[in-house]
């Protein structure tokens, strides 16, 4: 199976490197990291383990040079998705499967509208991944992936992809309902990614230690759970407890949204907060905390300079 990685940042570089190390044929689309990665390869630091180097790396600056793939892992931010209209076509052959590894809602729908002839899988990523320098990625914990069919992907193919991840040392399962899995993940991203930015730059440890921020995080999780349950999606009773316990093991982790915000890049406001809020409103489920957080994050995103200001 020939695998292409588009969006070779923290997530793309990490999973692509693990797959390549395990023997999968992986090519990477590289932009700012091209020179560093071609010269020195990828350096992946797993918590508590030795750093491993992937060298050489099959990295290219243009998708035309990568050629057609059987599977494309898409890990650029939802805010950069428009670029996929031009980036993806050179990678496509009739049965190429697209995997959306981004956080939030709407990524599979967008791919499905723009590339209607290709099977689409959603991938939910649980790694705490940060690009610390060009070609260097650290995983502060976790790393499993859940895969769910969005459109047209055969069950046997999904299992084959999951097997490739497992062989690469990545715990990977196939979920029955992609929608349910996305909402379960949002129960973490909505509070922690959001509060980390709206709170002025808190890591997750600070959110947990501050009684008011921690209460807000729990309240946001309960709102997410209410939306998922109103859709009758499986959502474990103890999910909030489990998420809080997992977060305690992350230490001073900065969510990916905070990393972008601090670097002055745009944040995934619509995918992580706007789209879930609109869906909650359509369903008539009250989500006042989410609504307030969305309003604040939109305003902060404008201030970061990455999107045009109101005048
Ligand atoms: N980091 C994490 O722990 C997790 C992240 N996620 C989600 O995964 C997705 C990716 O996140 P993350 O890996 O952190 O993001 P990064 O910002 O680290 O990576 C995005 C990559 O996309 C590349 N890119 C963007 N536009 C283009 C383009 N036009 N051409 C070529 N390359 C492009 C960027 O290149 P360049 O370097 O040149 O800017 C960058 O390497 C997001 O949706 C995030 O929410 C999900 C779970 C965990
Ligand atoms: C929850 C986490 C850390 C992945 O496990 C994430 O999605 C992020 O940092 O954006």
Image (spheres, helix red, strand yellow):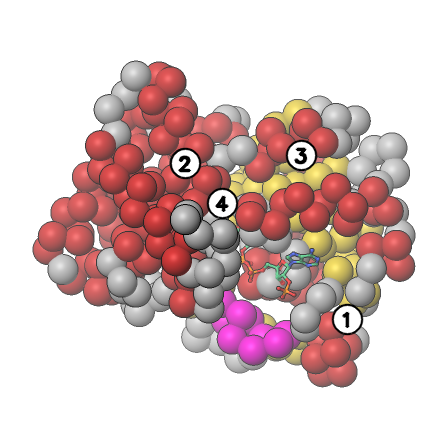
Counting residues from the start of the chain, the first of labels 1 and 4 encountered is 1
The residue located at (88%, 54%) in the rendering is 64
Magenta stretch: dominant secondary structure: strand
| Mark 1: few/some/many CA within 10 Å (<14, 14-19, 20+) | many
| Mark 3: few/some/many CA within 10 Å (<14, 14-19, 20+) | many
SS at circle 4 = loop
The residue labelled by disc 2 is 274
Instruction: Using the image, determine if residue 257 lies above or below residue 118.
Output: below
SS at circle 2 = helix
Task: Tell me if the residue at label 3 has its CB under 8 Å from ligand 1.
Answer: no
Q: CA distance from mark 2 to mark 4?
A: 13 Å
Task: Tell me if the residue at label 1 has its CB under 8 Å from ligand 1.
Answer: no
Counting residues from the start of the chain, the first of labels 2 and 1 encountered is 1
Q: Residue 103 shows which numbered tag?
A: 4
SS at circle 3 = helix
Counting residues from the start of the chain, the first of labels 3 and 2 encountered is 3
Is any part of residue 194 visible from this angle?
A: yes
The residue labelled by disc 3 is 111
**Boundaries of the magenta span:** 130-138
């Amino acid at each position: 199976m020939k695998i292409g990685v588009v969006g070779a940042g923290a997530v793309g570089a990490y999973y692509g490197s693990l797959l390549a190390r395990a023997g999968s044929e992986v090519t990477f689309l590289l932009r700012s990291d091209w020179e560093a990665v071609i010269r020195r390869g990828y350096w992946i630091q797993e918590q508590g383990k030795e750093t491993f180097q992937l060298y050489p790396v099959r990295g290219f600056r243009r998708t035309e040079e990568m050629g057609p793939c059987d599977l494309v892992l898409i890990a650029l931010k939802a805010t950069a998705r428009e670029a996929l209209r031009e980036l993806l076509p050179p990678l496509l052959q009739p049965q190429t499967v697209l995997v959306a590894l981004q956080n939030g809602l709407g990524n599979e729908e967008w791919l499905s509208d723009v590339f209607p002839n290709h099977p689409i899988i959603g991938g939910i990523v649980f790694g705490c991944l940060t690009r610390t320098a060009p070609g260097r990625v650290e995983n502060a914990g976790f790393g499993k992936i859940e895969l769910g069919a969005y459109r047209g992907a055969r069950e046997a193919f999904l299992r084959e992809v999951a097997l490739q991840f497992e062989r690469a040392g990545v715990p990977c399962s196939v979920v029955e309902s992609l929608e349910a899995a996305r909402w379960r993940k949002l129960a973490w991203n909505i509070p922690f990614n959001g509060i980390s930015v709206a709170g002025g730059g808190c890591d997750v440890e600070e959110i947990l230690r501050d009684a008011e921020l921690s209460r807000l995080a729990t309240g946001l999780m309960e709102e997410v759970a209410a939306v998922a349950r109103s859709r009758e999606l499986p959502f474990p009773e103890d999910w909030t407890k489990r998420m809080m316990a997992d977060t305690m093991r992350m230490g001073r982790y900065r969510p990916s949204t905070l990393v972008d915000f601090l670097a002055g890049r745009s944040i995934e406001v619509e995918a992580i907060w706007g789209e879930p809020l609109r869906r909650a409103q359509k369903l008539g489920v009250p989500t006042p905390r989410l609504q307030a957080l969305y309003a604040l994050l939109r305003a902060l995103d404008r201030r970061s300079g990455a999107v045009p200001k109101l005048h």
